[in-house]
Amino acid sequence: MNSTSGPSLRVRRDQALGAGAPLFYSEPLHIVRGDGVELFDADGRRYIDMYNNVPCVGHGNARVAEAMAAQQATLNVHSRYLHEGIVSFAERLVGLHTDRIESAVISCSGTEAVEVALGMARLATGRRGVIATNATYHGNTEAVIALTLAARRPAEHPEVATIPFPQRYRPITEGLDDGELADAYLEKLAAAIDHLEASGQGVAAIILCSILANEGLPDIPGDFMAKAAEMVRYAGGLVIADEVQAGYCRTGRWWGYEVTGFEPDIAVMGKPMGNGLPLSATVASRALVEGFRKGTRHFNTFAASPLQAAVGHAVIDEITEHGLAANASKIGGKLKAALAERAEGCPWIGDVRGHGLFIGVEMVTPGGDLAPDRARAVEVTDRLKDQGILASNAGAHANVLKLRPPLVLQQSHADEFLAAFDAVLADLDG
């Protein structure tokens, strides 16, 4: 990490923020500027950003920056006043969803949006129980992080029941066809529903990232998602789609649930909505949203503001006017295919999967037993950084190379990534 005279920036950071605040890479980067899909460090070195989905329409996007500056220079107040911008933004946002979505609660983070969704479901159903996967992550407040911690410490989180995340790569039962495998996972869901009913919690909701991003982007067997939604509704619960990572055309469609084949009762969005400005939303039917508003005193001083609205409109304008959904589908499809070709000759690449410009490359130990290799994934990300490519590792075993670039990625950038990846492959296999 770059430094000037006196203590290094990393030492000062530990003092200012407290040691333990996470940093990427064994030798952290000091990034000072961004432009599109490119980032530049303090020494002027250029990197291609293959990781950051928050600036979905590009780092330093001029339209977003201008909208932000113009609105801040004009007016920015809380939501207790009428304002055309926030109303038109909410109308536009819900209009991008399925017909069952009619109204929005605007927030500032994905975590807050999930909190709202959980509260909305619990108020509407009069029940407390929530079902999540055993490798999920939806945020970091006490209520939301319980969805993650319940798989490890279930006794401490009786309101949460977890299920194995559905996948084809490491199935819970071998030798089943696709439909049978989906049914095997649905049996686990049925058991979770029965557990919550028997405990007295009841089923308020199931919450799923629409493409199971934190689980490692698994290929989901059969029509698991649609049948899971049906089962939860039959039990009296609601279906929450977490679109914080899956949404905003990341998959080549506006919403991940369009790709994995189900319709939510509630959807939550965050990260890319403001291209860096804190902006998130929980959307549902008008009845659900109004029930939540009536049953709570929910208010956020910084949410549903004119500033958020101006930036939110600018981001949607950029996505639609520049065809970024089609761009994600086209370039992502080519990139995934190219990585799959490389996997065929590499013993430590176990699988390549994903949708649009969200691709996971699973690292395993050679030998055929599919043992996750987190160390190899970390090493690959470090070596890619040395080649001028920024990525990270994630997934249930933290062994999946996570590729999730801004949606403005061009084929030339993808080709640069592949050249760097080839160099890493040659070095590690040599």
Image (cartoon, helix red, strand yellow):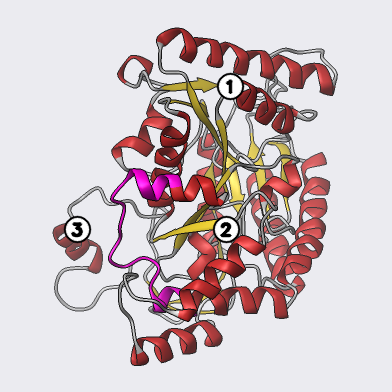
Secondary structure of the residue carrying numbered label 1 = loop
Check residue 294 for magenta coloring: yes
Q: Amino acid at mark 1?
A: Pro
Mark earlier in primary sequence (3, 2) = 3
Task: Give the residue drawn at x 76%, y 50%.
Answer: 339
Secondary structure of the residue carrying numbered label 3 = helix
Q: CA distance from mark 2 to mark 1?
A: 32 Å
**Residue position for label 2:** 384
**Residue position for label 1:** 164
Q: Amino acid at mark 3?
A: Leu
Q: Evaluate whether residue 49 shows in this view.
A: no
Range drawn in magenta:
291-310
**Residue position for label 3:** 17
Provide residue 18's location: percent of width, then percent of height. Answer: 17, 53
Q: Amino acid at mark 2?
A: Leu
Task: Give the residue drawn at x 50%, y 72%.
Answer: 87
Nearest to viewer (mark 2 / mark 1): 1
Task: Give the residue drawn at x 70%, y 20%.
Answer: 171
